[in-house]
Image (cartoon, helix red, strand yellow):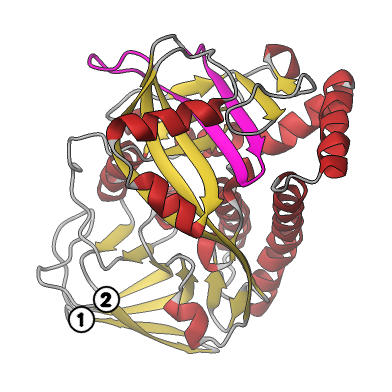
């Protein structure tokens, strides 16, 4: 990793060679949370990232946010990350799922999850920059975490262990290397782990809106022919007391055209997709982001002294808001396994340990990928027969309380 400044650890500058149990490449939300979780249990951890990890991000709200499921929130609370959030989160207390067409009222058949379906909020919305700040602070405050950022490393893996040589001149000896680098993971490619990709020829538009009426902690998933339109409740600010994040799917060309519209025209397109006027007048806030959408999955999650987590292992359609939460589930599973092995004095990078991790995570992740892919194909069209079938299906689930609650708990990661 090309580094322009010296790397550091939680205890200050370091030089020479160090030995750790686990070296994590990638200090995004998944990699950083895994580093804390392992170090808190007594493992020695190194984490490497190409980017610097500043104590504070740009102060302006940029419209990007994360939907954190209840199970993921519990993980972040245990990690001490949640308590370090510099901005308020917003609980998601209701979720309404509807079907419709732009510019028309939603179908009268719908599915709604409310307080009777769970004994806690379904999740929470937090600004992306707030999570980044909290994670950076947690890394530097945790003994046993050696932070190399900005830096890069060359990884050599052998049956007896791994060696990582950084561009800043450090040598790291590790029992296990974890790839948390995202969908284009170089370590995954180095290990020649095949990836299957499912293109959707769609883009997701991400932004935020201020609105006239309070959201009351209610989220909306409104299915449209081009793809889902999601409104997610955010904590308000002094300037915008009623605020929500939006994520919606369009064809590639349409998405870019919409994102470049003038302010009023863009607001008009948002109102057409809201389904009704329950939030009142809406005003776009912050930047607009356009991301290509696809799904992908690695054929295996492990190699010699290597494990994949998060987007390096799997990427899904955002239709259910579960992408990052799947990565946090990987963290929970891997941490449980590695902490148990470490407590028994075992080798955290041994083949049987890696097999146990893959067996615990990959089947459930594949099931979620298949479910989100099926949802996208079922709801992302205007076929009248399918429209009727899905509307009836939503209404049926809404009436069957045990089934509705089961769906809710699964989505919450509990």
Q: Residue drawn at (88%, 42%), measured in percent from left and top?
A: 385
Q: Which residue is mark 1?
A: 167
Please indicate whether residue 274 sits to the left or right of residue 263 in the image: right
- Whether 61 is drawn above or below 153: the answer is above
- Residue 237 within the segment the image draws in magenta: yes
Q: Secondary structure at mark 2?
A: loop
- Whether 13 is drawn above or below 235: the answer is below
Instruction: Point out the tag, 2 or 1, that comes first from the N-terminus.
Output: 2
Q: CA distance from mark 2 to mark 1?
A: 6 Å
Q: Residue drawn at (19%, 55%), measured in percent from left and top?
A: 11
Q: Quadrant of the C terminus?
A: top right
Please indicate whether residue 25 sits to the left or right of residue 115 in the image: left
Q: Residue drawn at (52%, 39%), measured in percent from left and top?
A: 75
Crowd rating for badge 2 (residues with CA inside 10 Å; few <14, some 14–19, many 20+): many
Q: Are marks 2 and 1 in contact (CB under 8 Å)?
A: yes
Image coordinates for residue 226, horizontal then vertical, percent:
61, 47
Range covered by the magenta-colored residues:
215-242
Q: Which residue is mark 2?
A: 152
Image coordinates for residue 5, horizontal then vertical, percent:
9, 68
- Residue 366 within the segment the image draws in magenta: no
Q: Which label was assigned to residue 412? A: none
Residue toward you, 372 or 357:
372
Image coordinates for residue 362, horizontal then vertical, percent:
71, 63
- Whether 278 is drawn above or below 376: the answer is above
Name the quadrant containing residue 227.
Answer: top right
Name the quadrant containing residue 133.
Answer: top left
């Amino acid at each position: 990793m090309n580094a322009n400044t010296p790397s550091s650890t939680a205890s200050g500058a370091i030089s020479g060679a160090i030995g750790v149990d686990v070296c994590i490449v990638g200090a995004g939300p998944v990699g950083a949370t895994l580093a804390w979780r392992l170090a808190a249990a007594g493992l020695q951890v190194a984490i490497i990232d190409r980017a610097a990890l500043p104590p504070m991000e740009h102060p302006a709200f940029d419209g990007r946010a994360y939907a954190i499921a209840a199970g993921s929130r519990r993980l972040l609370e245990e990690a001490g990350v949640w308590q370090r959030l510099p901005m308020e989160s917003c609980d998601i207390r209701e979720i309404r799922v509807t079907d419709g067409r732009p510019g028309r009222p939603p179908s009268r058949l719908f599915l709604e999850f409310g307080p009777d379906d769970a004994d806690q909020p379904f999740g929470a919305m937090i600004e992306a920059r707030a999570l980044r700040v909290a994670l950076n602070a947690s890394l530097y405050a945790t003994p046993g975490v050696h932070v190399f950022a900005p830096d890069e490393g060359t990884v050599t893996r052998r049956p007896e262990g791994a060696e990582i040589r950084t561009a800043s001149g450090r040598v790291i000896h590790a029992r296990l290397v974890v790839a948390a680098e995202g969908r284009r993971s170089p370590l995954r490619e180095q290990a020649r782990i095949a990836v299957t990709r499912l293109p959707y020829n769609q883009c997701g538009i991400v932004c935020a809106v201020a609105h006239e009426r309070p959201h009351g902690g209610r989220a909306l998933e409104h299915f449209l022919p081009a793809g889902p339109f999601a409104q997610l409740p955010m904590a308000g600010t002094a300037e915008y007391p009623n605020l929500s994040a939006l994520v919606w799917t369009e064809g590639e060309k349409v998405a870019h055209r919409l994102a470049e519209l003038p302010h009023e025209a863009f607001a008009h397109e948002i109102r057409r997709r809201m389904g009704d006027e329950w939030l009142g007048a809406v005003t776009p806030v912050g930047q607009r982001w356009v991301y290509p959408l696809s799904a992908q999955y690695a054929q295996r999650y492990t190699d010699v002294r290597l494990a994949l987590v998060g987007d390096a292992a799997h990427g899904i359609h955002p239709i259910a808001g579960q992408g990052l939460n799947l990565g946090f589930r990987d963290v929970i599973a891997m941490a449980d396994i590695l902490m148990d092995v470490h407590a028994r004095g075992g080798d955290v990078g041994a083949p049987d340990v890696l097999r146990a991790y893959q067996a615990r995570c990959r089947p459930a992740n594949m099931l979620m990928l298949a479910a989100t892919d099926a949802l996208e194909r079922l709801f992302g069209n205007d076929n009248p027969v399918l429209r009727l079938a899905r509307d009836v299906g939503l209404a049926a689930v809404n009436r069957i309380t045990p089934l509705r609650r089961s769906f809710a708990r699964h989505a919450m990661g509990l």
